[in-house]
Amino acid sequence: MRSLTVAEARALDVDAVERLGMPSALLMENAAAGVARAARALGDSFVVLCGGGNNGGDGLAAARHLGRRCRVFLLAEPDPERSPDAALQLRILRNAGHTVVADPDRVPAAAPGTVWIDALFGTGLGRPIEGRAATWIAAMNDATGPKLAVDVPSGLDGDRGVPRGASCVRADVTATFEAPKVGLLAPSAAPFVGRIEVVPLGLPEAP
């Protein structure tokens, strides 16, 4: 199976935007549609936990695809300068009247069987997860219902396949973009990754 390092995945995104001319918002939209498809295969009601970066933007866009049966919790507001696509997705959701609960100390419990979607941190995370984010991850891991990670489980090193600290999502399914990150295929990652589903970003085939 083809795999990508974190650096290779970033370079792929940059190439799509700068050489091919694909809007970064289109890449996010394609990623989110694939995440929503993977989520629907697991159930019909959803909780999505979103961070303030582009991984959170993927989750916000996926929530729009999933509709009113998706509850959205936002760890931090996206910075329009640093993460303009994520900020756009949040604005669209709010303009549509979709409730987004921002900055709660605890994520409320969900009914058994609810699908939990981890869109907190992507491949750019370079530190152990602490504070409110760690509380959210603990609640997700303890919840009854399938867990779906967006690109990589939050807290897992995408290259080495080991948690960066004590807090790491334990997913049943990881919907990873374009190709698995090399760390997802490491034996040490198996308890956190679950089944890998590859979500294409709509990139054209090379000649």
Image (cartoon, rainbow, N blue to C red):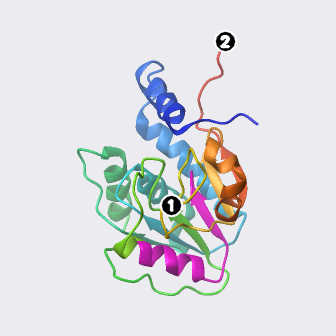
Note whether 74 is above or below 56 in the view shown.
Answer: below
Note whether 132 is above or below 67 in the view shown.
Answer: below
Mark 2 falls on what kind of element? loop
Q: Give x and y (percent) for residue 41.
A: 72, 63
Q: Give x and y (percent) for residue 183.
A: 62, 47
In this view, the residue in front, 89 or 53, is 53
Q: Which amino acid, by three-letter code, is at mark 1?
A: Ser
Left or right of 181, for residue 164: left
Mark 1 falls on what kind of element? loop
Q: Can the viewer see residue 101?
A: no
Q: Which mark is residue 189?
A: none
Which stretch appears magenta? 134-154
In the rendered image, the residue lying farthest to the right is 1
Q: Earlier in the sequence, mark 1 or mark 2?
A: 1
The residue lying at 56 percent from left, 63 percent from top is 66
Is 147 inside the magenta-drawn segment?
yes
Label 1 sits on residue: 154
The residue lying at 71 percent from left, 33 percent from top is 2
Label 2 sits on residue: 207
Question: Which image quadrant is residue 25 in?
Answer: top left
Is 136 inside the magenta-drawn segment?
yes
Q: Which amino acid, by three-letter code, is at mark 2?
A: Pro
